[in-house]
Image (spheres, rainbow, N blue to C red):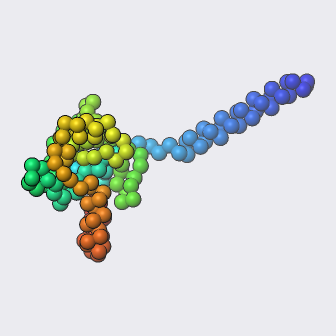
Amino acid sequence: MTRGLRTIRDGVTAFAMLALIWLIAAKLNSDAETVHSGAFHAADGDSLTIGGERMRLKGIDAPELVQNCERGGKSWACGREARDALQRLVSNAATQCGGTERDQYQRLLVICRSGTLDINGEMVRTGYAVSYGDYRREEDEARGVRSGLWAGTFERPRDFRDDERLHSGGGIVRMIGQAVGWN
């Protein structure tokens, strides 16, 4: 065999080995998507349940259920309104939520759709949630028209949770909250 043919053979062999390694790595890293369909129950503005599965809407952060905000100089129950808004969006039996990752509380991180409507994006667009990395354009839109939270003043949900933890000192309330996914 000539030197040129050996070089080509060795190159093809190396390429085949690299392709095989890449395919194995891709297979090991590909988690199967878990998809749930049906009418979901909104636990708060960014958490759902169906059957025994607990889920959190990926890329958004909604006010905590007990959180109040200010609008027009008056306090309003923004956490409860966010939950109610999400419940309206996920009540349709055709709603589908799917994801591959889990958060620190073992909730499935999901993107939910009802037909062509991205429910996660709609929560941000209507001002009932803020972007948590994925929905900046929708947040800018809500802020521009002063929808929902943006119609007044509010504490970002993450800051609210941090303040609650600081003032509660941890304890049993925090443990129960974590167990049921209030965080």
68 to 85, vertically: above or below: below
If the image is split into quadrants, where does the C terminus sit? bottom left
Please say whether residue 24 is visible from this viewpoint: yes
How far across and down, in percent of the image, does residue 167 sit? 26, 71
173 to 58, vertically: above or below: below
How far across and down, in percent of the image, does residue 66 sit? 17, 60
170 to 115, vertically: above or below: below
The residue shown at (27%, 55%) is 157
- Dividing the picture into quadrants, the one containing residue 177 is bottom left
The residue shown at (36%, 51%) is 108
- Dividing the picture into quadrants, the one containing residue 103 is bottom left
The furthest residue to the right: 2
If the image is split into quadrants, where does the N terminus sit? top right
The residue shown at (22%, 50%) is 45
Please say whether residue 181 is visible from this viewpoint: no
How far across and down, in percent of the image, does residue 176 sit? 27, 68
How far across and down, in percent of the image, does residue 23 sit? 60, 38
162 to the left or right of 127: right
44 to 91, vertically: above or below: below
- Dividing the picture into quadrants, the one containing residue 37 is top left
The residue shown at (30%, 54%) is 54
Along the line of sight, the residue nearer the viewer: 165 or 83 = 165
Along the line of sight, the residue nearer the viewer: 70 or 63 = 70
- Badge count: 0
